[in-house]
Amino acid sequence: MTRVFISRDMASVALGADDVARAFVAAGCEVIRTGSRGLFSIEPLVELESEEGRIGYGPVGPADVAAVLDGSHANRLGRVETLPFFANQPRFTFARCGLTDPLSLSDYATHGGWKGLEAARARAPQQVVDAVKASGLRGRGGAGFPTGIKWQTVLDASSLAKFIVCNADEGDSGTFADRMLMEGDPYCLIEGMAIAAHAVGAGHGYIYIRSEYPFAISTMRAAIDACAHLIAPFTLEVREGAGAYVCGEETALLDSIEGKRGQVRAKPPLPALQGLFGQPTVINNVLSLAAVPFILAEGAEAYAAVGFGRSRGTMPVQLAGNVRHGGLYEVGFGITLGDLVNEVGGGTASGSPVRAVQVGGPLGAYFPPGMFHLPFDYEAFAEAGGLIGHAGITVFDDSVDMAHMARFAMEFCAAESCGKCTPCRIGSTRGVEIMERIMARREQDSPRPDPAIPAGLAKALYSRSPAPAQRGAEQEIALLRDLADTMKYGSLCALGGFTPYPVLSALDYFPEDFVAPAPAKEAAE
Amino acid sequence: MEDFINAWTLRHGRSRDKLLPLLHAIQEECGYVGDGLVPVIARALNISRADVHGVVTFYHDFRRAPSGRHIVKLCRAESCQARGGTAIEAQAVQRLGVAMGQTRADGQVSLEPVYCLGLCAIGPNALVDGRPVARIDAAALGHIAAEVGA
């Protein structure tokens, strides 16, 4: 019987993979559902087992079964690993994703699973922490704090109970690596958490997953049940979030697990010393924990050998938005932003010129193509007034209205603020108001008809505030900068503190969108 | 519902940290968390009514009134905007006959904003009664509207 591999990743399913899988079953094939390889322009991807390896076809629809099975389908890709998108990727974290049945324990073991945990358990906890330190692994959730130092703090804390918490509240638009890993290789995350538990002496762990990821939640729950005997005495459970972006902030996440409103806690005390239920807690992002099995199995040196400056190892970069070859691209730090967008991503999907890319989610800066020389590195991005965050890159073509995006950033912060600190809670609302006045003045002076947006909606979006009378455009912008400054330095956490990044970068790099008259599009390039 | 809550706490425990899982279970069971249940939940977990009310109203997922028979969640985040999401949102409002964040008067469909489903390279995206749909255009909106009977 022909063995066929088809992804069950949420993105593949959204593109129709379930219907394709049913069609192959009906044709008498044995269908194995895997995670996604991570290149969505070829999904739904179907791979046929053959003597030369797995031969890929994609995108494939339910009507294409016969043509795929007899090899005549026009979208024959050959071996997927040899496609240019995949050929140069050092897949440390995503090595198994797309290859294996995510819930098959035998698949996981035959593809190198549990080696890291075995190696860790053969060593003393301090040696495991030392290995993580030596790897140079930094928190992949956004802040880039060295993971080994965090673990050392928890190891050194004395307490009857310690916890491992995985932050799987990946809420940034343009990011999906956590979701893909949890759906495509759940045991990898579990193994990383079990290694962390051994390293610091924790007995129980939580995976806090956002409710917008129903596939990840069910896959992780099934995986935990299936491998409980292999990670014992360590125990794990999944906690489902409830639609609050701020719960991606680690202290708000801890409050949410405790059954409270997800409000940010002031630090110190550090969660490493007084975290979940007041006990010492390792709280790491999915990708940080999923990098650990490789480090223990292959050695810290092998991991640290890849990278750039103080950013060691690989980063699963997510190419999103208006990009031709969108998907997950795991790569060593140091590749330039321009190479990621133009070479790997192939430019925009619409074919229009790239005008802006937002790196690091809704709190990340917007960069123009003039900044494409930036190397992907925590320090380089911080210096340029941005952040890598969770390594999501959202591409916009020249139809984007950057004043609208700046307004959206403020609106998002206002909607998602936990309300604990004033600069974030009130500042974001005042920010929306300033942006509405700026945009109303702009429309008034020089209406910008956007063919993509019906006239009625444009009016509703841009002219809610009364026509500005008192302040000039320059004064409004000065007020916006002043407000951004207050939010940046006065907020308790990254939500209020980083919202100025998208707002100010839009203003700095695309000032023409904030004033009237609007210049011709050519002038913006 | 009181019986349901008691049975749930017998099975899963009554500690305060069970509040979110309990609220999810209640919403799964009856579609929303009615205000009348707040004192019952407070008693079951031995916390104050204010605590329960605070949590129910803090999280976007918990409803305090019934939803429509079908729920369409449409992504409004940056990646979907970069792929024409704002225009699709306007068309969805027209096609489904309901404003964003509202339930249609006949109770047939609720249209809700969602901020990122993690399908960011293939937007605009939606969840239609829990089923993910990518690359939404006018034709796909037509299919969705037919599916939810709008």
Image: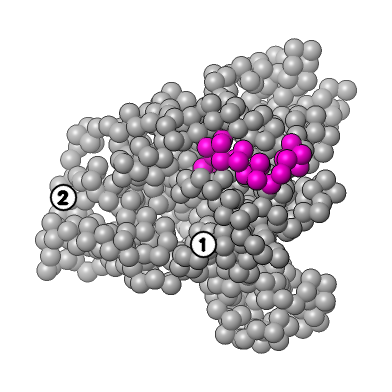
Between A154 and B57, the residue placed more toward the observer is: A154
Which quarter of the image is occupied by the C terminus of chain A?
A: top left
10 Å crowding of disc 1: few (<14), some (14-19), many (20+)? some
Q: Verify whether residue A9 appears in magenta.
A: no
Residue beneath disc 1: A270
Image position of B17 with respect to A447: above or below? below
Q: Quadrant of residue B23?
A: bottom right
Q: Is residue A120 magenta?
A: yes
Residue at 36% across / 64% down in the picture?
A: A491
Which residue is tagged 2? A516
* Mark 2 burial class by Cα count in 10 Å: few <14, some 14-19, many 20+: some
Range of magenta residues: A119-140
* In this picture, residue A263 sits left or right of residue A100: left
> What amino acid does circle 1 point to?
Leu
Pointer 2 or 1: first along the chain: 1
Q: Please tell me how many numbered marks the rendered image carries.
A: 2
Position above or below: A283 against A85: below
Q: Residue at x 71, y 29 (%)?
A: A99
Asked which secondary structure carries label 2, the reply is loop
Residue A398 appears in view: no
Identify the amino acid type marked 2. Answer: Ala
**What label does residue A412 carry, if any?**
none
Q: Position of residue A181 (x, y in %)?
A: 64, 41
**Which quadrant would the N terminus of chain A be assigned to in this image?**
top right
Of tags 2 and 1, which is closer to the observer?
Answer: 1
Chain for numbered disc 2: A
Same chain letter for marks 2 and 1: yes
Tell me the subunit letter for badge 1.
A
Residue A377 percent across, percent down from the top left: 41, 36
Residue placed at 71% from the left, 44% from the top? A124
Q: Position of residue B41 (x, y in %)?
A: 69, 82
Percent x, y of residue B45: 71, 81
